[in-house]
Image: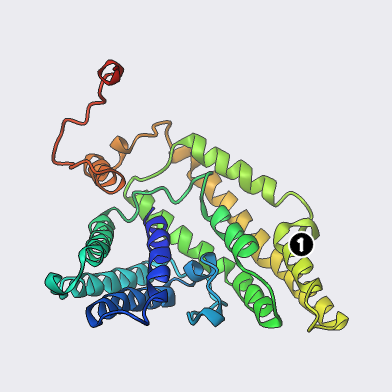
Amino acid sequence: MKKIYLLIFALFLCVSAIFLGNIQDSSAELNTLFDDFFRDYLELNPNTGTILGLTREMGYEFDRSRITNFSDANLDRELDLIKVYYEKAFTFPLEDLDKKERLDLAIFQLFLKNIIDGDEFRYHGYLITHLYGIHYELLNLMTENHSIYSRIDAEDYLSRLEQFPERFDQLFVGLSISRKKNILPPRIIIEKSRDILQEFISPPVEKNIYYTYFGESVNNLPEIDSFGKTELKKRALDLTESTVYSSHKRFISYLDDILPEADNNAGVWKLPEGDRYYEYCLKIHTTTDPRIRNTTPIPIGKFSR
């Protein structure tokens, strides 16, 4: 869920950065803070830059040949970065900012604080889900967001395919941590996820979207001759089988392994510190103060005219 907030806020930063030219010093410093944070964040999260469609021509440099590292070590680096900018966000004298800029800064501060506060629940969000799990994360990244307009783009795509085993290894490490914390999704989610994965790898490799998307994109590149296109597509076909299919098969085996441990309970109440996690979710998704316990729904009749 934290990533969703980062993507939304990244859009805000991109828009803000456009207006860095003709503004007062205080405004320029504030927008520079936003822009610097976004650039530093992109270094740790290249997936975000790809999802947002940021091109080199826009002036945003990040490694388009990498998949975001979701290891604990990289998540810790991201948290450290966020804490640094959270401290910086309180160095601006409010009297030098206009009303809109004060609101922008307040949003930025709250945005960062929510992430910092939520780190203790790093593994409370299910890493296995049939709705938006790793299979959809990577599929959308590679076939919806990773544009292929040049040979460099094609090579970056192949490089990312090579990293699938590493990305799934990071998932398995995260899942092992979740298991130790007794955080597992209900059986139905595991079963549905397994069915989706199995269905995805059931067609022949040459008909899989990872390969067909790449092949169609490469065929439309005039800068590459027919021999070069054939060579690139052969590499993509081999990688789709050796990294994409093999990683999905490993995931299916893992799901089979943990299924006996799962139960049918789906509420966050079953998680360790589930009540506090619920309050955190309530705080970041609504304007409700979690310290106020009366969150009982208002009867429909109260809304009658």
* Left or right: 4 in relation to 119: right
* Residue 143 shown left or right of residue 113 in the figure: right
Left or right: residue 40 compared with residue 90: right
Image height of 114 relative to 45, above or below? above
Q: For the residue labelled by badge 1, is the local secondary structure a helix, a strand or a loop? A: helix
Residue 193 against residue 35 in the figure, above or below: above
Which percent across, then down, holds residue 209?
Answer: 72, 58
Type of amino acid at the residue the image marks with label 1? Thr
The image quarter containing residue 186 is top left
Estimate the x, y position of residue 218 in percent, counting from the top left.
77, 73
Q: How is the image coloured?
A: rainbow
Q: Residue furthest front?
A: 22
Residue at 21%, 44% in the rendered image: 276
Place of residue 192 in the rendered image (x, y in percent of width and height, measured from the top left): 56, 39
Q: Is residue 111 above or below residue 261?
A: below
Q: Quadrant of residue 4?
A: bottom left
Residue highlighted by disc 1: 212
Q: Position of residue 199 (x, y in %)?
A: 68, 45
Q: Residue at x 62, y 41 (%)?
A: 195
Residue under the image location 43 percent in, 31 percent down: 264
Foreground residue among 62 and 69? 62
